[in-house]
Amino acid sequence: MEKNNKTVIGSILIIIAGCFWGSMGIFVRRLGTYGFSSIQIVSIRVTLAAMIFALVLYIKDRKGFRISLRDITLFLGLGFGSILFFTICYFTAITMMSLSTAAILLYTSPIWIMLMSVLFFHEKLNREKLIALVLAFAGCVLVSGISGEGMTPAGLAVGLGSGIGYGLYSILGTIALRRYSTYTVTAYTFIFAAVGSWFICRPSDMFYKFSNAKDSVFLIFFCFLTALITAVIPFLTYTLGLEHVEASKAGIIATIEPMVATLVGIIVFSEPLTLMSGSGIFLILTAVIILNLKREKQKGA
């Protein structure tokens, strides 16, 4: 019973993470009005998130800054191989194809998570997971819109790279959580991601845009808010959720993000709700419900 309760709590935490990630469009669009490029917005987001995570770790457990030298590669994988890699691939894919196609390729991540979970964690592939996976992916396709415009072999590779990189966080995060606390994992993940981002964000140009902003005080506040809402809170809750939920299930539950993003578009930006996107939302919710239905026999799940 206690294990089931923890699983439910873990699922709720992952849903919360997906909801916060789904609000990202609000912040990205606003920062874009200041002239920041996509990569610069990523750098701002991960750098400030790294500072906040480091502060949280300092308050919660100063000893948490101690990590083994042999685990440097693990955190390099989380910071460079996952957070930074998938973001760069995703934004590159956006420039090479339609937004909807890039989003669909990004949300192949649950497929990669499930395959990697079977390979590395020997998780069982049961009917429940497979049905939920199909429903969640179909829902993402419908929410994002079915489009193959601008697709090239290079674009396909980059798009799939974003999905693999996105899914890699669940796999490497699960491994890291066996050795370190949630706060240590998130802090070092974003510290490495932030360091990497400064090599590609054109820092001088970014500082020029900050210094020439008419409302620089508000801009700095909004940047911190962006990091808090789209990175700190969701990655913290998602990582906490990974402590109690299998990586494969977590990846499927997190597909609630595009559903939330669609709802944000409807409510905040007055975007229309189509029959296709409404059907996609229904399929994603169905997938999440299937994974969280209480069953008497859950040992095989």
Image (tube, rainbow, N blue to C red):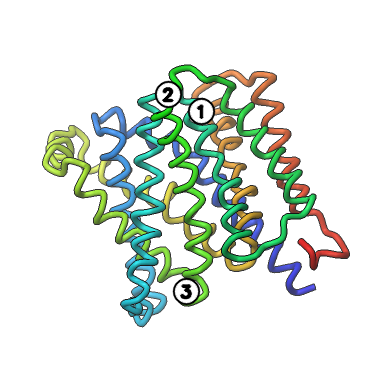
Residues 111 and 243: in front is 111
Which numbered marker is on residue 268?
1
Disc 2 crowd rating (10 Å Cα; few below 14, some 14-19, many 20+) is few
What residue is shown at x 62% (from left), y 54% (from top)?
A: 250
231 w.r.t. 285: above or below: below
Q: Secondary structure at mark 2?
A: loop
Above or below: residue 84 compared with residue 108: below
Q: Which residue is mark 3?
A: 181
Residue at image coords 37%, 30%: 29
Residue of label 2:
152
Labels 2 and 3: the sequence-earlier one: 2
Q: Residue at x 52, y 62 (%)?
A: 239
> Percent position (x, y) of residue 240?
55, 64
| Front-lying residue, 60 or 239 | 239
Mark 1 vs mark 3, CA separation in Å? 36 Å
x, y percent for residue 115? 60, 52
In the picture as drawn, the residue positioned furthest to the right comes out as: 296
Q: CA distance from mark 2 to mark 3?
A: 42 Å
SS category of the residue bearing label 1: helix
Residue occupying the point 72% across, 60% down: 124
User: Distance of mark 2 from mark 1, alpha carbons?
Assistant: 33 Å
Q: Secondary structure at mark 3?
A: loop
The amino acid type, in three-letter code, at marker 2 is: Thr
Of the residues under marks 1 and 3, which one precedes in the sequence?
3
In front: label 1 or label 3 = 3
Q: Quadrant of residue 41?
A: top left
Q: Name the amino acid, label 1.
A: Val
Quadrant into which the C terminus falls: bottom right
Q: Circles 2 and 1: CB distance less than 8 Å? A: no
Place of residue 242 in the rendered image (x, y in percent of width and height, measured from the top left): 58, 63
Q: Could you classify mark 1 by the number of other residues whose Cα lies within 10 Å: few (under 14), some (14-19), or many (20 or more)? A: few
